[in-house]
Image: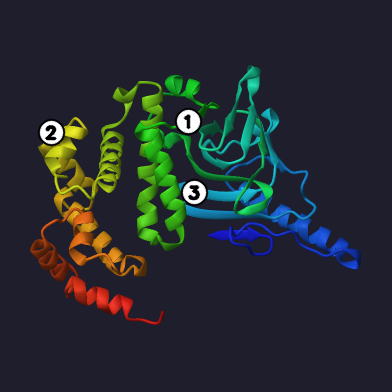
Amino acid sequence: MTATTGPGSPDGAAGAAGEAGAAGEAAGADAEERFETWRDLITLTRECDASTPHTDGFSAGLRRLELGPVTFLGTSFPSSRFRRTAARVRSSDPSVFHLTLLLNGALDLSGPHGSGFASGAGDLSVLDSSRPYDLRAFGARSAGSPRPRVDALGLDFPRALLPIPPDRLRRLLARSYRPQGGTGALLADFLHSLDRQAERIPPATAERLGPVLVDLVAAWLAEESETTDTLAPTARRRALVEHVRAFVRRNLHDPALTPTVIAAAHHVSVSYLHRVFTEENGGESIAAWIRRRRLEQAHRDLADPALRAVPVHALAARCGIPRPDDFSRAFRAAYGLSPRDHRRQALSGPG
């Protein structure tokens, strides 16, 4: 689900409504209604009191995707404040964790007993609906919007899904993290990819993605607290598979990318890698998955007008298939025509 509270724009989020003079009052009413709509959508899973000094001309965008028990959010809005008081926690607590990846702007959180954090673009943070908080979000200018905006991606999911003991989890919450590598960076990349693909994800796939994301969050937090031994075996396997997929995508061009190399890079045996990857990948082996990804990349590159002058064998080599005969056979088996015929058909259209 994608909701935009404001006239359309390239980023799907902005545009001040109304004109001067007689239209001013109507424009103000529209802006207030847009703010209330956006606030209501936010509080479907993030139950808090939201306010902003920018109700005049308010515009915001919200992308919302249900991933089984997990809700994915992508939003863009002006500077705002989100408060969840102790009284509100006592009256209603959905027992949900809120993970946020800040893309633009800044966050300043105040919690109970002097706790809190400040974070900037690129930071990850996790809040607990069972704890009061006062979160101020400050917009910043970006190339895509003439006005200061806060842009963020987030996940909301039941606390019970996170397989980390509460006593170890407590000190990890209401903090800001800058993912420099490991599972934190993988999680951030996953959220970016999910945001780009959100409108094209089939419902059955979306249903399966939720538990995978929770396992990535669990693996990341376990790394932060150095308690990976407490993770459930399922969470560890899923995190390993996502690390492997990311590793393959980064090294797809390398013809020496084999299960042996991948297993060594992730400190597991080849037999364990084969078994876990196949189990978590719907029965498809890691070698078959690598071959499919290479052919898919070559299929896209051959249809790209910007790469028209690059020879077919060079594109194949860039995808990790250096032998032209092997590439032609595999491509024809996968797509039913030769690489040159595919390129000719793809590039013969208008323009």
Mark 1 is surrounded, within 10 Å at the Cα level, by few (under 14), some (14 to 19) or many (20 or more) other residues, namely: some
Residue at x 16% of width, y 54% of height: 288
Residue type at mark 2: give it: Ser
The residue that mark 3 highlights is 72
| Mark 2, residue position | 269
The tally of labels here is 3
- Rendered position, 277 above or below 87: below
The picture quadrant where one finds residue 60 is: bottom right
Estimate the spatial distance between the alpha carbons at disc 1 and disc 3, rounded to whole Å: 20 Å
The amino acid type, in three-letter code, at marker 3 is Phe
Q: Residues within 10 Å of mark 3 (few under 14, many from 20)?
A: many
Decide which of tag 1 and tag 2 comes sooner along the chain: 1
Whether residue 33 sits left or right of residue 92 in the image: it is right
The amino acid type found where label 1 is placed reads Arg
Q: Which residue is mark 1?
A: 178
Task: Please report the residue visible at 32 percent of the width from the left and 25 percent of the height from the top.
Answer: 228
